[in-house]
Image (tube, helix red, strand yellow):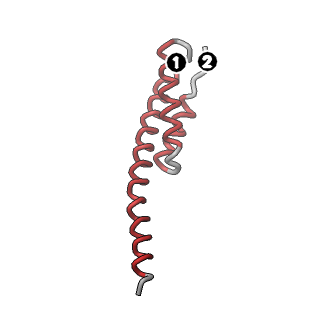
Amino acid sequence: MKPHRGTLILVFGILSIVFCQPLGIAAWIMGSGDLKQMDAGAMDPSGRSNTNAGRICGIVGTILLIVSVLAIIPLVALGFLGAILGGQH
């Protein structure tokens, strides 16, 4: 039976919300995979709560990443538009 990575996944998930949003993708993928292995009996199930909490934090971090990217795209476009229009005096 493989050891669980619940603590690592939880740390990745928390960091994805607080500091580094791309870690949310890793926490989400790792957490989902580990939960499947726990359900199959191939991984130590004692870390299930940390793994699930990290996966959920990873989902939240990934959503924050998507919202951030979607908010930045129009701002960059407006900046380019302002530069183009501002340079034509």
Q: Secondary structure at mark 2?
A: loop
Residue at point 40% right, 75% down?
82
- Are discs 2 and 1 less than 8 Å apart at CB? yes
Per the image, the residue denoted by label 1 is 37
How far across and how far down the image is residue 51, in percent?
A: 49, 29
How far across and how far down the image is residue 11, in percent?
A: 54, 39
Q: On the picture, is 59 further left or further right than 41?
A: left
Name the disc covering residue 2, or none.
2
Q: On the picture, is 4 further left or further right than 65?
A: right
72 and 85: which is toward the camera: 85
How far across and how far down the image is residue 57, in percent?
A: 44, 39
Residue at point 52% right, 18% down?
37
Q: Label 2 vs label 1: CA separation?
A: 9 Å
For disc 2, the neighbor class at 10 Å (few under 14, some 14 to 19, many from 20) is few
Type of amino acid under label 2: Lys
Residue at point 50% right, 32% down?
29
Q: Secondary structure at mark 1?
A: helix
Type of amino acid under label 1: Gln
Q: Is residue 30 above or below residue 81?
A: above
Q: Closer to the N terminus: mark 2 or mark 1?
A: 2
How far across and how far down the image is residue 18, in percent?
A: 48, 49
Name the quadrant of the C terminus. Answer: bottom left
Residue ranking furthest to the right: 2
Residue at point 40% right, 65% down?
75
Q: On the picture, is 41 further left or further right than 56?
A: right
Residue 84 found in image quarter: bottom left
Q: Is residue 84 above or below residue 10?
A: below
